[in-house]
Image (spheres, coloured by chain):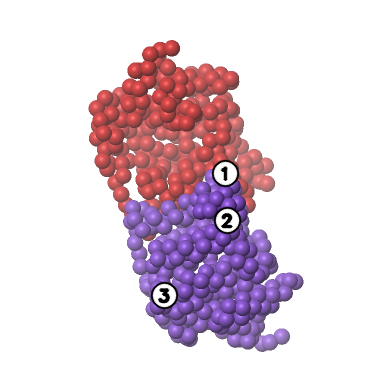
Chain colours: A red, B purple
Amino acid sequence: MKCRKCGEKASVHMRQHKLALCKEHYLEWVPEQTERFIKKYQMFTPAEKILVAVSGGKDSLGLWDILIRLGYQADGLYLGLGIDGGINYSHESQSLTEKFAAQHDLKLHIVDIEKEYGQPIPVLAEISHRGHGKPCAVCGLTKRHEMNRIARDLGYAVLATGHNLDDEAAVLFGNTLNWSSEYLLRQGPALPLADGLARKVKPLCRFYEREMTAYCVARGIEYIYEECPFAEGSQSIYYKELLNQLETTRPGAKLTFYLRFLEARKSGELFIEKDIERAHLHPCEKCGQPTSAPGMCSFCRTMEKVSSVPAS
Amino acid sequence: MKCRKCGEKASVHMRQHKLALCKEHYLEWVPEQTERFIKKYQMFTPAEKILVAVSGGKDSLGLWDILIRLGYQADGLYLGLGIDGGINYSHESQSLTEKFAAQHDLKLHIVDIEKEYGQPIPVLAEISHRGHGKPCAVCGLTKRHEMNRIARDLGYAVLATGHNLDDEAAVLFGNTLNWSSEYLLRQGPALPLADGLARKVKPLCRFYEREMTAYCVARGIEYIYEECPFAEGSQSIYYKELLNQLETTRPGAKLTFYLRFLEARKSGELFIEKDIERAHLHPCEKCGQPTSAPGMCSFCRTMEKVSSVPAS
């Protein structure tokens, strides 16, 4: 197969776009497309300060790299979760993130959850009894809270995450199987600002996971290959597998599923419009972040519970 | 496992309901549930005349049997499609349908497509060049048209089909993958009357396919085991397989997917309301059935095309 732009040997073939590109043109195409998505979904402008949530994985490091190449003001935020899992997971991913930041002379904020809250994520999860024996619920809650907190405290207007199409399609698939109105009416590539929160954007939402791998490999970005050791057996991985089956027999099925959903949301032909974000929200009495819970937000309630347990 | 009602050995276990029943109580439960669905979705009353579309398969013969047991006025309609497929498919299914009607002393209308329109379905499909080499598109079009025609001509208020949950969930799944507003806003267990058309209802829409098999076996109903020979490799069978994978790991997933969709439609929390049925419809200038196409409906246009081809 030949590169559509120069006719040389192609190194990446995107069946869903009927497009093949050589390495050089692929490395041009990815930022061009990202720029297109940023504008299409009105994510941010060059004048805004962006905080990129980086985990050391291919998606977030790839995103940071692309935003810098496009000339955006993008700093990084690494959350040290304290996950080992027999592979030194958090330590490795932090090293790779720091290395990337140093190589490109970028500003990286690091928050160590254990230093902030007394315990690493797996222990916080255990003490708080949330999430059926897996730390994923507490981890998600904590990451959301900390990203919002740091963005607000440091004055970032925008919080960018590396969610790719496989991530977004899997979430959409799960929400669709349950027809969860609350989530279906909110999911999208750019969440509007809620009071006191940075705008959340997902500039990679139209790239397949394998495209981000190809981008990082072609760019020579060192990222952590391992998934989080707790991700194994998760529902989202199961949904990704089902969607990949579909994709294999019908190239583009995943992309169509996600894009037609966004179109249906936008057109008003299928879904009602609802200002979900602002409905029933008030500031948490402890941290001030918007919450729908009475009194304190879930995160602060969880941390209260944790801090009331005597250290063992 | 024991029958929940009598404690005897259970013969059917419905994991999605956490319910096991012996043969005798299963044969009571199925009509009771059907009656519940008929009322819940306001399908019809005992005063109305119902035309049941019967194919000789387990679902439609099962449905006819249940409706008669419940005391409804249900006559049958068999459409002779002229499909052989090396297994004498249409002939066998017609014999089984006639046998069932005779055994229960029921009124059965038979329409032979070849006699009405000059050719059996596979030839009509070939001549009309619809459906990418498969007769399924023309078959579906013809069946819909003929069911509507006979119901109207013979004065039936209601047209009942044997679609089960697996059928409905697969259709919903396909419509969801494409976020097809037109179909998503219309799909349901009871379609309201459009001008001149009988109300279309699906009283079995909450039974799993295997439950209908169990019902027919337990009732001793002879039905055609084979699927239509043209169904192999169809999209709907592929979707059924994917949904069955989901069901295996999470019993009830198929039912939840369908029921929550119906709830979301009804609640107004997710979807807009739209009078899809009556939008842009006018009577076909040839047959008088409502159509959105200008002039003639798709069926009449297809048949015009077919009749203009000289017999070979």
Amino acid under disc 1: Thr
Amino acid under disc 2: Cys
Of marks 2 and 3, the one in the foreground: 2
Using the image, tell me which numbered label, if any, was put on residue B226.
none
Image quadrant of residue B166?
bottom right
Classed neighbour count for the residue bearing mark 1: other residues with Cα under 10 Å, few (<14), some (14–19), many (≥20) = few
User: Could you tell me which chain the residue with mark 1 belongs to?
Assistant: B
The secondary element bearing badge 2 is classed as loop
Circles 3 and 1 in contact, beta carbons < 8 Å:
no
Q: Which residue is mark 3?
A: B46
The foreground one among B286 and B256 is: B256
Q: Which residue is mark 1?
A: B249
User: Could you tell me which chain the residue with mark 3 belongs to?
Assistant: B
Q: Which residue is mark 2?
A: B22
Image quadrant of residue A216?
top right
Residue drawn at point x = 48 percent, y = 85 percent: B154
Total numbered labels placed on residues in the image: 3
Q: Residue furthest top?
A: A312
Amino acid under disc 3: Pro
The secondary element bearing badge 1 is classed as helix
- Please tell me which of labels 2 and 3 falls first in the chain: 2
The secondary element bearing badge 3 is classed as loop
Q: Give the percent coordinates (x, y) of residue A101.
A: 47, 21
Of marks 1 and 2, the one in the foreground: 2
Classed neighbour count for the residue bearing mark 3: other residues with Cα under 10 Å, few (<14), some (14–19), many (≥20) = few
Q: Are marks 1 and 2 on the same chain?
A: yes
Q: In the displayed structure, does residue A63 sit left or right of residue A297?
A: right
Quadrant containing the C terminus of chain A is top left
Give the distance between the C-alpha atoms of the residues marked 3 and 1, in whole angstroms.
Answer: 40 Å
Q: Give the percent coordinates (x, y) of residue B149.
A: 49, 82
